[in-house]
Image (tube, rainbow, N blue to C red):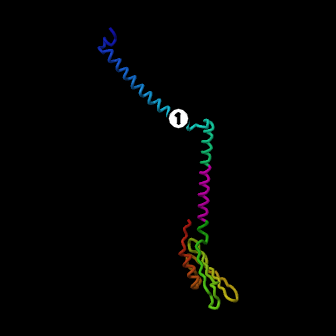
Amino acid sequence: MGIFDAIGIDAGIVLIIVILIQLVLIFFLVKQSMKLARLANKYKMFMRGKDAISLEKAFEKKFEEVDAMTEAVKYQADEIYKLKEIQKMTLNKTAIVKYDAFKDVGGKLSFALAMLDKENSGFVLNAIHSREGCYTYVKEIVKGESYIVLGEEEKEALRQAVNAHNDIG
């Protein structure tokens, strides 16, 4: 009389259950073995031509390059900000109107040049060409307005400069 007979369990059923459990375990073992083989192949491809130490150094080098690029980007952003601040003060809105100051002098050698900043402040330069010489006059412009009377050509140059697009900044 065996242990199973004393409990009232058939030994054949216990044997079948143990075999089924072993088959399930073998199935999972094969599945895990296949996963491990795939991972090993990926690892071999990753490490091909390099040992672990040189790979670690390659990573360190790349991280140093990323850090250097990050610093360069910060520096460039600061420089761009400084340039934009300077650009706000530059005379970057311009217009020129060429004209004949006198009926007897042709070729439109006279001109009115308006140069303004972002706030439409700057100057209008008027160069009048005659047979005797060339005379230049400068009139200050503050926020698109002149405190000195402007000639027609100067007004036109100022109008064109004020309406000039300034896409920078």
Task: Specify whether 55 is left or right of 17.
Answer: right
Q: Which residue is mark 1?
A: 41
Please tell me how many numbered marks the rendered image carries: 1
Position of residue 19 relative to residue 3, above or below, is: below
Task: Specify whether 16 is left or right of 113.
Answer: left
**Disc 1 on helix, strand or loop?**
helix
Position of residue 87 relative to residue 150, above or below, is: above
Give the percent coordinates (x, y) of residue 76.
Answer: 61, 57
Label 1: few (<14), some or many (≥20) within 10 Å? few
Q: Which of the image's four quarters has the N terminus?
A: top left
Q: Which residue range is magenta in the image?
A: 68-85
Query: Magenta-highlighted stretch: main secondary structure?
Result: helix
Amino acid identity at mark 1: Asn
The part of the image, by quadrant, that contains residue 45 is top right
Q: Nearer the viewer, residue 139 or 158?
A: 158
> Residue at point 47% right, 33% down?
35
Give the percent coordinates (x, y) of residue 15.
Answer: 35, 17
> Residue at point 62% right, 36% down?
53
Q: Nearer the viewer, residue 46 or 5?
A: 46
Q: Is residue 69 magenta?
A: yes
Q: Nearer the viewer, residue 77 or 145?
A: 77
Give the percent coordinates (x, y) of residue 149.
Answer: 58, 85
Q: Which of the image's four quarters has the C terminus?
A: bottom right
